[in-house]
Image (tube, rainbow, N blue to C red):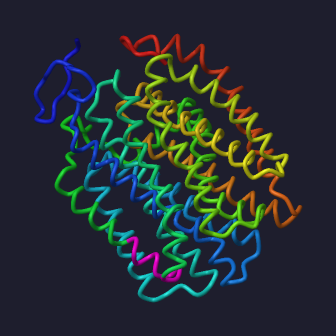
Amino acid sequence: MAPIQTKNGTKAKDGGFWQAGHRPTLIAAFLYFDLAFMVWVLLGPLAPIIASDLGLTPAQKGLMVAVPTLAGAILRLVNGVLVDRIGPKRTGTIGQVIVIGGLTTAWALGINSYGGTLAVGVVLGFAGASFAVALPLASRWYPPEHQGKAMGIAGMGNSGTVLAALFAPVLAKLFGWNAVFGLAVIPLTAVLVYYQIAAKDSPSQPAPKPVTAYLAVLKERDAWWFMLFYGVTFGGFVGLSASLSIYFTDRFALTPVAAGYCTAAAVFAGSLVRPFGGALADKIGGIRTLTGVYALAGVTLVAISTAPASIVLTLALFLLVMATLGAGNGAVFQLVPQRFRSEIGVMTGLVGFGGGVGGFYLASSLGFAKQLTGSTSTGFLIFAGLAFVALVGLSIVKQRWRSTWGAALDGVRI
């Protein structure tokens, strides 16, 4: 087997996935990502309660839960550059300190206006930007044949959205929704301490480049394709994660706690499947995996747009589409390191930006569609159309990818 880089910088034979990289860093990346995602979507499960207290319109609710997604998308670009300039561990530390400080301030001062919720949303965007840190922090320790699994395990940290959906409404009922911001600081601080102890930057960290060099990757059309592909898979996942509590309370008159449980089930499905999506892409290729993902996701979103009267059927459709999109998230990041290994930091930021923009669009469009038409159906239909656009785009690039950079990879399927 091919030699790989070990945690102490020496060469070793690959004895399997768990021996191929640095396990403490992989665990630290997962925990950091998990807790960061928990607070990134915190406004989603709290939205029905906040909207009732502040008298928000459907459009305001949609924008409130979408702002953290947009802020996270923009900040991922910044983190992508910082990861390559100062390393992922240091970049992640800065982001965690900002989020902890921001949530502590929000809890201490109290949030009592719509503008205040938007300001909190911007702070939460720093948590969403963790994506551009956690994935390269973990992936740089692993050789190409294990990228899908490493990225999938680290990326499974998006399961933090399950924690937000499960516990935020319950804690808000017990202590008030402002107190939830302060309570979130407790696990965030614990993870920050572990992260400082366990996480290590890989010895294969690339040398820093001039900032202008990062713009060069935008000249590569493949970068734009990956941004589109992730804009659908991750954009759909995070957009729905932020919006489903509102959907279930508005559509079926569920309590915020019950809506949180339904949301948690759907989000758990998407999070659980992500590493399997990466592993499946390792086995059959990311292109084949994504072809199935976009076709199934598009069809399922069309079915959701019909607004089924049965809550059981509706929940089943959301479970299916979230699991499908979760597998797609893993598949996209099986491909990205193969094409852009030396620029993985900035590419993680760029592709994550595309995913964040997709999530912002979906969450905000559902709110505006509800206000303008009385139904969210139009929002779901348009996003289904984007899934089919991604499917067509994949068919356009797959032959070129396989015959160019894909052909140069030894034993790796794309």
Viewer-proximal residue among 389 and 167: 167
- From this viewpoint, which residue is outermost toward the right? 373
Instruction: Name the residue at 65% across, 38% down.
Output: 320
Image height of 153 relative to 16, above or below:
below
Residue 3, image quadrant: top left
Image side of residue 335 versus residue 84, left or right? right
**Image spot of residue 390 (x, y percent):** 68, 32
The image shows a total of numbered marks equal to: 0
**Image spot of residue 74 (x, y percent):** 52, 57
Instruction: Name the residue at 72% across, 78% down.
Output: 56
Viewer-proximal residue among 373 and 141: 373
Residue 225, image quadrant: top right
Image height of 112 relative to 404, above or below:
below
**Image spot of residue 271 (x, y percent):** 49, 44
Q: What span is colored magenta in the figure? A: 175-184
Instruction: Name the residue at 48% across, 34% down.
Output: 330
The question of residue 176 being in magenta is answered with yes
